[in-house]
Image (cartoon, rainbow, N blue to C red):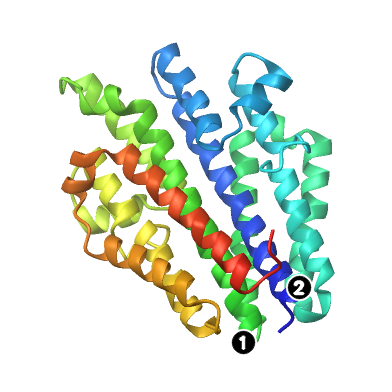
């Protein structure tokens, strides 16, 4: 396969996944903002979302003070923001168009229809009328794109590069989502006194986080107990049976790298395998004791390093 073709397929999948995960991060902040909480805690949540996405400076240049409605607009509709949903879905469509011949008709039509429908929704004001419903739509279109890809594409290198892009992006975004919620509300929940009101708030906040990654039902099946921050962290980081966990994502990254391996990729495969093994044998109590934020920051650095290695070994170097 030509490296240029592989590059377009890889980034088409990454941008589609990034749009979905941006919608998930916005949705969890939007949902938790509707719960009883102090203005300071709510503000920290929105500031944390910008910070972990490394968008605080460009946001402040454009809007100044952090306000929920402006953050959502910036992360959805502003085309100068490369991580906004509109920018991601445009990039996904353009990458798909560039390799139209390598895709099935269903995959191309799904990407193209997603773009057309999004432009209609934004121009009609549907996003402002019901942000939660819009975020659900973005997630649904990403699910549809993934399902059509797996259901219609030949199981060859093209599909492997798309899967590689999907799970590397998902690992990055799950780490960012966990870091946003735990870093922003660590003092609020880990230091709570256990009153009935605090326990109620604790439940609704962490259940919103779980629902944002489609993990609420899985949590109930695995733990069959009250929702605690420590178990939420364990589920989203170390559980291989949670589809959006860091460990599950790295399992997929490693398995696809093994199939795609070439004469130049040994170092990248080794780094991916090392990261996978650390998650496989990791213990949540040790991670929390050493600092969750530090762990996730290091994980993000290593995922970015893997992305650079994949580009160097297989794709068009950025």
| x, y percent for residue 303 | 47, 56
Tell me if residue 129 can be seen. no
Residue 147 image label: none
Q: Residue at x 74, y 46 (%)?
A: 87
At x 44% / y 29%, what residue is drawn? 32
Residue hosting label 1: 156
Q: Residues within 10 Å of mark 2 (few under 14, many from 20)?
A: some
Under circle 2, the secondary element is helix
- The mark total stands at 2
Please name which of the two marks, 2 or 1, marks the residue nearer to the observer. Answer: 2
Give how far apart the Cα atoms at labels 2 and 1 are.
16 Å
Q: Nearer the viewer, residue 69 or 283?
A: 283
The quadrant where residue 94 appears: bottom right
- Say which quarter of the image contains residue 93: bottom right
Q: Percent from the top left, x then y, of residue 57?
A: 63, 25
The spot of residue 295 in percent (x, y) is: 32, 45
Q: x and y percent of residue 176 in the render?
A: 46, 43
Residue 105, by quadrant, is bottom right
Position of residue 273 in the picture relative to residue 142 (left or right): left
The residue where tag 2 is placed is: 4
What residue sits 17% from the left and 47% below the top? 286
The numbered mark, 2 or 1, whose residue comes first in the sequence reads 2
């Amino acid at each position: 396969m030509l490296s240029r073709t592989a590059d377009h397929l890889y980034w088409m999948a990454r941008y589609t996944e990034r749009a979905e995960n941006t919608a998930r991060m916005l949705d969890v902040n939007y949902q938790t903002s509707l719960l009883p909480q102090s203005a300071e805690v709510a503000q920290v949540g929105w500031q944390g979302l910008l910070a972990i996405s490394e968008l605080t400076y460009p946001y402040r240049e454009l809007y100044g003070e952090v306000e929920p409605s402006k953050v959502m607009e910036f992360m959805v509709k502003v085309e100068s923001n490369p991580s906004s949903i509109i920018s991601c879905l445009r990039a996904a469509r353009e990458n798909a168009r560039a390799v139209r011949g390598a895709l099935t008709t269903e995959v191309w039509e799904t990407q193209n229809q997603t773009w057309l429908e999004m432009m209609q929704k934004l121009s009609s004001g549907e996003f402002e009328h019901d942000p939660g419903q819009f975020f659900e739509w973005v997630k649904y279109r990403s699910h549809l794109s993934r399902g059509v890809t797996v259901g219609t594409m030949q199981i060859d290198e093209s599909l492997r590069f798309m899967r590689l892009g999907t799970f590397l992006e998902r690992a990055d975004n799950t780490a960012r989502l966990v870091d946003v919620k735990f870093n922003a509300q660590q003092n609020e929940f880990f230091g709570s006194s256990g009153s009935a009101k605090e326990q109620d708030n604790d439940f609704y906040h962490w259940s919103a986080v779980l629902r944002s990654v489609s993990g609420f039902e899985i949590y109930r099946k695995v733990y069959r107990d009250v929702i605690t921050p420590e178990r939420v962290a364990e589920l989203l980081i170390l559980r291989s049976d949670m589809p959006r966990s860091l460990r599950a994502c790295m399992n997929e990254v490693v398995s696809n790298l093994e199939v795609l391996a070439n004469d130049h990729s040994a170092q990248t495969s080794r780094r991916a395998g090392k990261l996978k093994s650390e998650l496989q044998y990791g213990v949540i109590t040790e991670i929390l004791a050493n600092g969750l934020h530090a762990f996730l920051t290091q994980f993000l650095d290593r995922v970015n390093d893997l992305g650079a290695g994949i580009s160097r070994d297989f794709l068009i170097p950025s």
